[in-house]
Amino acid sequence: MDLIESFSIDHRYIIPGIFLSREDTLGDYKVTTYDIRLKRPNVEPAVDVSAMHSLEHIIATYLRNNKEWKNEIIYWGPMGCLTGFYLILKGNRKPSEIYDLILNAFSEVENYNYVPGAEEANCGNYLLHNLTFAKFYAKEFKEYLIKNKDNKLIFEYPKTKRLVTNEGNNFFDS
């Protein structure tokens, strides 16, 4: 079985940032998946699950209500490893072109005094939220993005190549 594209990025070298994960064509439409990475995988602690859930609700609400972008948003959701989010947009912009959108989304979190949709009727795990922690992580990532705005490394996956065997298989060290 082939290793999926997102697992082929060497996670030992990923830093927080806004990365192009994949581009797809669906019929006549191009869609792009972005890796919005808040934490260094396997180096920094993952985002607290209740904070991640709250960030998902708040930022999804912000994105889907953003007048400029709402018709471009397909999906916003957490990575299973809890080190970041996936954002899927219509079109194929460079990661640097969505910098302001992401910065504004994380900046907006501080303006919330409740988590939208965190009621039993609206959420499958409505008790698993933490607005205080969500605000902490959002502020941390926002400040990181501002500090690193001119650092091209926050927009490009690390460039490492895996060895390929004579049979064409990827070699993974242990």
Image (cartoon, rainbow, N blue to C red):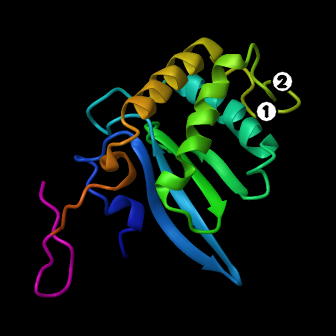
Measure the C-alpha gap from mark 1 to mark 2: 6 Å
Amino acid at circle 2: Glu
Residue at position x 75%, y 25% in the image: 126
- Are the residues tagged 1 and 2 within 8 Å (C-beta)? yes
Say which of 86 and 138 sits in front: 138
In-image side of 117 versus 134 (left or right): right
> Residue under circle 2?
119
Q: Residue 163's image quarter?
A: bottom left
In-image side of 112 versus 170 (left or right): right
In-image side of 11 versus 166 (left or right): right
Q: Position of residue 26 (x, y in %)?
A: 66, 79
- Helix, strand or loop at mark 2: loop
Q: Residue furthest bottom?
A: 167
Residue 63 is tagged as: none
Residue at position x 37%, y 39% in the image: 16
Amino acid at circle 1: Cys
Say which of 150 and 65 sits in front: 150
Residue at position x 64%, y 68% in the image: 91
> Residue under circle 1?
123
Examine the residues drawn in magenta and state their main secondary structure. Answer: loop
Q: Position of residue 62 (x, y in %)?
A: 74, 36
Q: Position of residue 29 (x, y in %)?
A: 69, 77
Q: Residue 27's image quarter?
A: bottom right
Q: Is residue 12 above or below residue 10?
A: above
Residue stretch in magenta: 163-174
Q: Is residue 173 magenta?
A: yes
User: Where is the C terminus found, in terms of image quarters?
Assistant: bottom left
Q: Is residue 17 magenta?
A: no
